[in-house]
Amino acid sequence: MRRLLTVLLLGVHPLAAQSYHVAKTVTLGGSGGWDYLALDTVGHRLFIARQDRVLVVNPDSGLLLGEIPGMNGAHGVAFAYGAGHGFATSGRDSTVTMFDLKSLAVLGRTKVALDDDAILYDAATNRVFTFNGSSRSATALDASTGQLVGTIDLNAAPEFGVAAGDGKLYANLEDQAAVAEIDASAMRVTRRWSIAPCERPTGLAIDRTSHRLFSGCRSGVMAVSDAVAGKLVTTLPIGSGVDACRFDSASRLAFASNGDGTMTEVREATPDSFAVVATVPTRLGARTMELDPKTHRVFTVTAEFGPAPEPTPDHPHPRPPVVPGTFVLLILDP
């Protein structure tokens, strides 16, 4: 009680004063790689992109509830609750699959652009946006019909994106160490700014209250940006191999999941004051993540790996193969 009172007197949310830990490990098994995780906050289901399908699991128990088949390089999932639709990107065949949120039945597939990767829903325009790495673009779909609206030329390779809730989108530009601001209605880039010394930004999260963006960078830092001023605020050290970031508005904690087997916790004391408060052990390869804003749980996934294949000119840094049957869900509690 004394510790809790001290925390409250200092004006810090109790969750921000303690480190996370792996509370449960659930074996999901199967074969193939994976990418992003997305939490359906209405239906309380966790969606996991798994190469040729999307797994749907109970986030409390890890029980498999269903699958969305027919993917070819599954990457990300977004939810349009008003339309009752979910959307999943399939990067190798350049498609977006629209499915029914209740039944998970596939409703249609729309051709977008090569290497459609991250995806988000923007409530201000009722549009779904994909971020297409190799195509150096973003594509918009109507969330009600799944039909193509148009394409935005980014002139850079985008990675993850977030919606600010006011019709503005933000995306990491991996090959330019920059962030782009996008007008979701006008379908154009309104500005961009450098986040150097960050290099190869991947994961991205947003604090919609303080208008701060958190970019996870493969150079081993988290870059914090002021989205109003369009400038870098600071950088903080994180682990290596980051691929996702999240922000908890209640605890004022930003998270980076790192492929080196760690999760970095960063506390936002003020909009201009940040500090690393913990480096949490996870497991090697746990590079993507999701956050439940109600329970404050964090989810990540990984597997065991076999020997990496020999490098080739086309694949100078080949990934090691996933050992079948070893894919696991890690549930972290504060």
Image (spheres, rainbow, N blue to C red):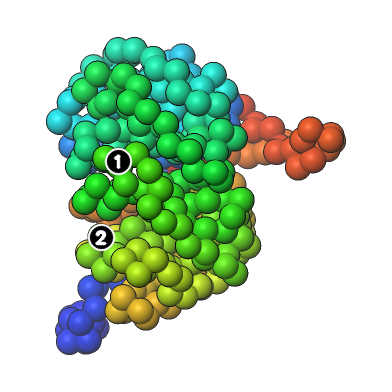
Which of pointers 1 and 2 lies earlier in the amino acid sequence?
A: 1
User: Which quadrant of the figure contains the N terminus?
Assistant: bottom left
Camera-side residue of 180 and 28: 180
For disc 2, the marked residue is 208
- Residue 330 lies, in percent from the top left, at 44, 46
- Residue 177 lies, in percent from the top left, at 57, 58
- Residue 56 lies, in percent from the top left, at 35, 28
Secondary structure under the numbered disc 1 in the rendered image = loop
User: Which residue is rendered at x = 42% and y = 62% of the image?
Assistant: 214
Camera-side residue of 57 and 221: 221
Q: Are marks 1 and 2 in contact (CB under 8 Å)?
A: no
User: Which residue is rendered at x = 22% and y = 65% of the image?
Assistant: 209
The Cα–Cα distance between marks 1 and 2, rounded to whole angstroms, is 21 Å
Disc 1 residue crowd, few under 14, some 14–19, many 20+, Cα 10 Å: few
Secondary structure under the numbered disc 2 in the rendered image = loop
Rendered position, 179 above or below 77: below
For disc 1, the marked residue is 186
User: Which quadrant of the figure contains the C terminus?
Assistant: bottom left
Rendered position, 168 above or below 39: below
- Amino acid type of disc 1? Ala
- Residue 82 lies, in percent from the top left, at 15, 30
Q: Is residue 217 toward the left or the right of residue 274 in the image?
A: right
Q: Is residue 114 something that shows in the picture?
A: yes
Residue 55 occupies quadrant: top left
User: Which residue is rendered at x = 18% and y = 32% of the image?
Assistant: 81
- Amino acid type of disc 2? Arg
Residue 253 occupies quadrant: bottom left
